[in-house]
Amino acid sequence: MTGFSDVLGHEQTILHMKHAIEMDKVSHAYIISGEKGSGKKLLADLFAQTLQCERKGTEPCMECQSCKQALSLNQPDIIRVIHEKPNTISVEDIRTQINGDIMIRPYSSPYKIYIVDEAEKLSVQAQNALLKTIEEPPVYAVLLLLTTNAGMLLQTIRSRCVILELKPVSSPMVKNYLMEQLEVPEYHADICTAFAQGNVGKAKRLALSDSFSEMLEHALHLVKYIHDMEVVDMISDLKRINTYKMEINDYLDLLTVWYRDVLMFKATRDADSLIFSHELISIREKAQKSSYEGLECIIKSLEKAKIRLNANVNFDMALELLLLTMKEN
């Protein structure tokens, strides 16, 4: 684990946490909200580790007994709530792991900290059980609720917590991280950064994913050659797209970004603003062959395909319609 100073972005959230520690105004309950991969768990772990650090600074020292225990996930007063049911945190989980434990004083630390990941999965009964603890917590208790959707929590819960909403990290910062720390080539870093939209965890996952690289290669092959494909070639490509069924939104987003690049270049002739800048020759050729209306039709068809697939329309039928629209335009 790194210290706060090594976290990418989230300056306001970190400043709030450090100020609360420095001024001794730590709240009894926090909601840390952000999409998957945005850094919720990292920030919660750092906050908890810093609160328990024996040197009592605004950064974990990484050297004291408490920090060493936290790093190995063995700090007895940092409790991570777990749940057996994959889609639900039950009232029993809360009663046994928080309510039934919280009145026991900390074993060796100033605080007793409970980290509830995926808090959006708390059942209504579990939230009501938790509410009683949030309303009357012991002075040493701190609850950290991590969620992708704070709106899934009861208003009575939200009103009694400090809400820290994680904002997207700037694209230049994400790109630099991929290139400098992960040694990702610039063109690949550009694509991963564009897709991640400020989510460092997602950008890292895409950059290191072999399957994403394969998907990208196939998507580029499709957009370059679909206009000249025969029916048998399109059927072959449709079978290949089927292998990306679990990641189909990412695949369709790749196609969308490419066609938007073509549309942008056709309108401006500005190569500097392209995501697929390394595909300039192909983009220029497509821009010359396609009309504005045709490109806009393809982009709208990509959006319709995503809507249809999310509505559980037949996968092959939805993709066949899309490929025909791409070929015709």
Image (cartoon, grey):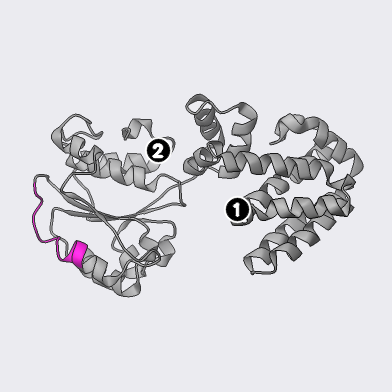
Residue in front for this viewpoint, 25 or 251:
251
Q: Is residue 91 above or below residue 140?
A: below
Q: Is residue 152 above or below residue 283?
A: below
Residue, x 53% and y 28% (percent of image)? 176
Q: Dot 1: what SS?
A: helix
As drawn, is 155 to the left or to the right of 321? left
Q: Which residue was labeled with disc 2?
A: 11
Which sits earlier in the primary sequence, circle 1 or circle 2? 2
Q: Which residue was labeled with disc 1?
A: 247
Q: Is residue 329 visible?
A: no
Numbered circle sitting on residue 33: none
Label 1 CA crowd tier, 10 Å (few <14, some 14–19, many 20+): some
Q: Is residue 107 visible?
A: yes
Instruction: Name the spot of residue 106 as percent of width and height, x first.
Output: 10, 51
Q: Amino acid at mark 1?
A: Glu
Instruction: Name the spot of residue 132 as percent of width and height, x first.
Output: 21, 70
Instruction: Kindly indicate the quadrant of the structure image that contains residue 65.
Output: top left
Read off the magenta span. 96-107
Instruction: Name the spot of residue 136 as percent of width and height, x first.
Output: 17, 65
Residue, x 87% and y 54% (percent of image)? 231
Instruction: Kindly indicate the quadrant of the structure image that contains residue 193.
Output: top right
As drawn, is 144 to the left or to the right of 283? left
Q: Amino acid at mark 2?
A: Glu
Residue, x 61% and y 27% (percent of image)? 186
Residue in front for this viewpoint, 161 or 284:
284
Q: Quadrant of the N terminus?
A: top left
Which marked residue is nearer to the observer: mark 1 or mark 2? 1
Q: Exactly how many numbered labels are in the figure? A: 2
Instruction: Name the spot of residue 79 as percent of width and height, x first.
Output: 21, 52
Magenta-drawn stretch, dominant element (helix, strand or loop) = loop
Label 2 CA crowd tier, 10 Å (few <14, some 14–19, many 20+): some
